[in-house]
Amino acid sequence: MKIHEYQAKELFRAAGVPTPRGIVCKSPEEAAAAFGELGGSLAVVKSQIHAGGRGKGHFKEHPDQAGVVLVRSADEAKQNAARMLGSTLVTIQTGEEGKKVNTVFVEEGLDIANELYVAVTVDRDRRTPILIASSEGGMDIEHVAEHTPEKILKTPVDGGYGLHAFQATELAFKLGLEGKAVRKAAKFLPALVRFFLDSDCDMAEVNPLVVTGAGDLVALDAKVSFDGNALFRHKNLDAYRDLTEENDSEIRAGKAGLSYVKLDGNIGCLVNGAGLAMSTMDLIQLHGGEPANFLDVGGGASVEAITEAFEIILADPNVKAILVNIFGGIMRCDYVVEALLEAYDKVGITVPLVVRLEGTNVEKARTMLADSGKDIATAADLTDAAQKVVASLSA
C-alpha cells in the first residue's frame, strides 16, 4: 500500500525522522493561509499523488504548471494551488493518463547546503533489508545507478536490531558529511531503518535528504509503501489509504478476496495460484502476446469468485481474449468447470476463451467442457494454451 508524501512525513516525525514543517491544503485559500502560518519568505507547494517525478511533471489542463513549485508569497501559493487542485498531473511514473490532484502540501523553505539520497528496501538476493545511499540526492536514482554506479552505497541491515551506530557513522563519512552533520546522520539513519522495520515497509525513500546550512539532516521528500500482506498488523494505517489513487478493478477484486493486478496487454488471465499466474504470463509473452492482468482466484474458487473474476477481466476494454489456466489440486477440475460454465452464462463472454486444466478429475472436466456446446477452446498443456490464445487475437 502506498501513501502520500504528507502522510509519510507524519509517520516519519512520530518515528524520530526530521521533516520540514508543512500544512495539508484542500483549496487555494488554505494554501495562501498556510504560507502565512509557516511564516517564512519561501515555501513549496507540492501536488500530492501516488507517483514520483512530480517536480518535472506537467498538468494536462495547464502544460506550463509543474507539480512542485517554490513560492515567495501567499498569492503565489494560492495561484499555484488553484492550478494544481482538480487538475491532472502527468509524470514519468503516471503514464499519459496522469493522476488527479485532490490535495496540495505547503511546506516551509529550507536553507539547503547539500542534497543526498537514502532509501531502505529489501535486498532479495541477500534476503535482508538494505540501506541504499548516494551523495547524488535530488536526482533520478536509476540514472545515477546506470551512469555512476560507484556513487550508490549499499549497507545490509540487521533485520532484528536495525542499523548499528558504527554503520551509520561509517556511511555518513562515505557520503562526505562532516562535523555536526555526521552526528545528525548517526540518529537520522537508524531512525529511518527502525521505521522501515517496525512498519513492515516495502520501501522508505528520502530523495532528497537535505543537509541544511546549520548541519541538520531533514527529509525534504518522502515515499513510503507497505507490505500488503502485513497490513493486518498495522490497523493504524487503514486511515492512510486513499482509494482514489487505486485502480477500481483492484479494489473490487480485493473485496472479493481475489489477487488482481492490471497490466497493459490484451489477454486476460484467470488462474489459481501466484506461481501459475507468473508462468502463464511468461508463456503468453514467449509466444508473442501481452497479458492484460494478473488474476489469481486462489485454491478454493467458488462460482461467485469465478464469476466476479470474469466480470473484472471483461470490464477492461483492452481485453480481447481470455486464458483460463487451472491446476486442480485440492479443488477438483470438474468442480472448477462446473463453476466456469455457470459463470460463462452469467457474465456473457464475447471474446475468445481458451481453457487449460490439469489435476484431479481432469478427464471428467474436459468431457464436461466438450459437452457444454459453448464456444470454449481447450488446450492440452500450457504451451498449447498460450499459443491458442495468442493466435485467437488474429483469427
Image (cartoon, helix red, strand yellow):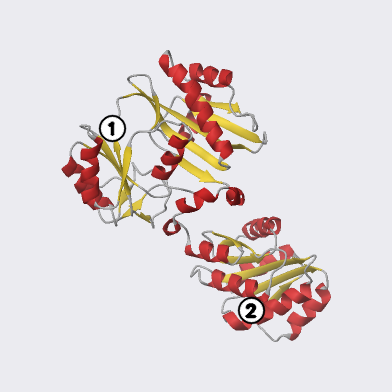
Residue at x 48%, y 34% (from the top left corner) = 15
Residue 106, x across and y down, in percent: 29, 42
Tag 1: Cα neighbours inside 10 Å, few (<14), some, or many (≥20)? some
**Secondary element at tag 1:** loop
Q: Nearer the viewer, residue 36 or 393?
A: 36
Residue 198 appears left or right of 40: right
Q: Report the Cα–Cα distance between label 1 and label 2.
A: 57 Å
Which amino acid type is shown beneath numbered disc 1?
Gly
| Above/below status of 2 relative to 382 | above
- Nearer to us in this view, 353 or 55: 55
Of the image marks 1 and 2, the number of the one nearer the N terminus: 1
Q: Residues within 10 Å of mark 2 (few under 14, many from 20)?
A: many
Quick check: 23 above or below 244? above
In the picture, residue 116 is in which quadrant?
A: top left
What secondary structure is found at the residue carrying circle 2?
helix
Res 94 label? none
Query: Disc 1 or disc 2, which is closer to the eye?
Result: 1
- The total number of labels drawn is 2
Quadrant position of the C terminus in the picture: bottom right
Residue at 76% across / 76% down in the picture?
335
**Closest to the observer, 212 or 339:** 212
Q: What percent of the width, then of the height, locates residue 3?
A: 45, 48
Q: Residue at x 67, y 72 (%)?
A: 354
Where residue 109 is drawn, which disc sits there? 1
Q: Tell me if residue 382 comes above or below residue 43 in the rendering.
A: below
Q: Residue at x 47, y 22 (%)?
A: 185
> Which residue carries the number 2 mark?
343
The percent position of residue 391, horizontal first and vertical second, equals: 62, 69
